Amino acid sequence: MTSPLEPINLDDFETLAREKLSAMAWAYYASGAHDEVTLRENRAAFDRISLHYRVLQDVSRRDLATTVLGSRVSMPILVAPTAFHGLAHPDRELATTRAAGKAGTVMILSTLATSSVEEVVAAASGPVWFQLYVFKDRAATEALVRRAERAGAKALVLTVDAPLLGRRERDVRNRFQLPPGLRVENLVPEGMSDLPPTACDSGLAAYFASLLDPALTWKDLEWLRGVARVPLVVKGIVRADDAARAVDSGAQAIVVSNHGGRQLDTSPATISVLPAIVERVAGRAEVFLDGGVRRGTSVLKALALGARAVLVGRPILWGLAVGGEAGVSAVLDVLRTELDLALALSGCTNVASVGRDLIEP
């Protein structure tokens, strides 16, 4: 008789989470768009990058701390915005937020959360950023911004790569919908309809199409910058020219992201486009990255190529499904431990000492 798997890496958490989640929830969290080429490539691209470590460096003391948008964090690993944590655990986003605070890092709350921004900030012991979509109803968008700011969100993270929802065929087959008792807590109070039951296709895709504005342009980003009273982060950039324009339009940070491979399939892996974006931004804004981060060495490679920090999404959900708040804490601890080891073995004592020479000596 075999003993239950004791998770020692993020893949183990994923294996255990699949056993605990419903088939519909698993498919929603795990899926990518169409053939899931980008979903796989996000991770595979990290594996093709070698680390050219230094030896005979004094690495007896190491420090993982850094700052993001002026907030000190214990490590350059942030909790990415992901929807519907209530599918994974009854404590929903509140458990994730508490774990992020204990880990000394930032919780980024999705608009499509099953907990309200007010609940989440009240449960937080660290910074909370609010991920935002711009809706057809600009007044409702502005009202949501004001709610997030009043609640205490320290930044807005505008997702710009979803004028429509990518076609996630696993969701289509499952006719994805939220189970009874869960709803989109941040939108219903603003007078927007909740995610409806669906008899065909993906209910989420139809919901997006009814609310989001596919006519969004750079002028709308400038409008939001004028509305917001907190720093603005633009998430969903894979081109250097778009990164530069985002900064010109008022973004104080960008996230190099392809939405976890869930939007345009065959879009580039984020780590592959990071260097060009960092070069183009040229220090005018902070640059973060998400997509495919599963090891401490992945974090180290992103830092070496110019990212200030990475965002981690799906592994947080796996931890939440496995053990609630404790499971999320365990996932963050695994990444912290792996990054600390990778730093030491690379001859680095802190994140500021990580440079491009680790990739290109």
Image (cartoon, grey):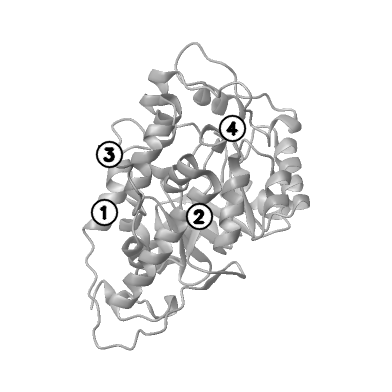
Residue found at x 58% / y 63% = 252
Residue found at x 67% / y 24% = 193
Tell me if residue 91 can be seen: yes
Amino acid carrying mark 4 in the image: Leu
Q: Give whichever of 44, 167 is nearer the camera.
A: 44
The crowding category of the residue bearing disc 4, from other C-alpha atoms within 10 Å (few below 14, some 14 to 19, many at least 20), is some
Q: Which residue is disc 1 drawn over?
A: 45
Q: In the image, which disc is placed on residue 212?
A: 4
Amino acid carrying mark 1 in the image: Ala
Spatial CA distance of label 1 from label 4 is 31 Å
> Residue 167 appears at what percent x and percent y?
40, 28
Spatial CA distance of label 2 from label 1 is 27 Å
N-term mark: 1 or 3: 3
Q: In the image, which disc is placed on residue 329?
A: 2
Nearer the camera: disc 2 or disc 1: 2
> Residue 334 appears at what percent x and percent y?
40, 59
Residues tagged 2 and 1 counted as in contact (Cβ below 8 A): no
> Residue 47 appears at what percent x and percent y?
23, 57
Q: Give whichever of 11, 309 is nearer the camera.
A: 11
Residue 260 sits in quarter? top left
Nearer the camera: disc 2 or disc 4: 2
Q: Which residue is disc 3 drawn over?
A: 37
N-term mark: 2 or 4: 4
Q: Give whichever of 77, 89 is nearer the camera.
A: 89
Residue found at x 72% / y 42% = 144
Q: Secondary structure at mark 1?
A: helix
Nearer the camera: disc 3 or disc 4: 3
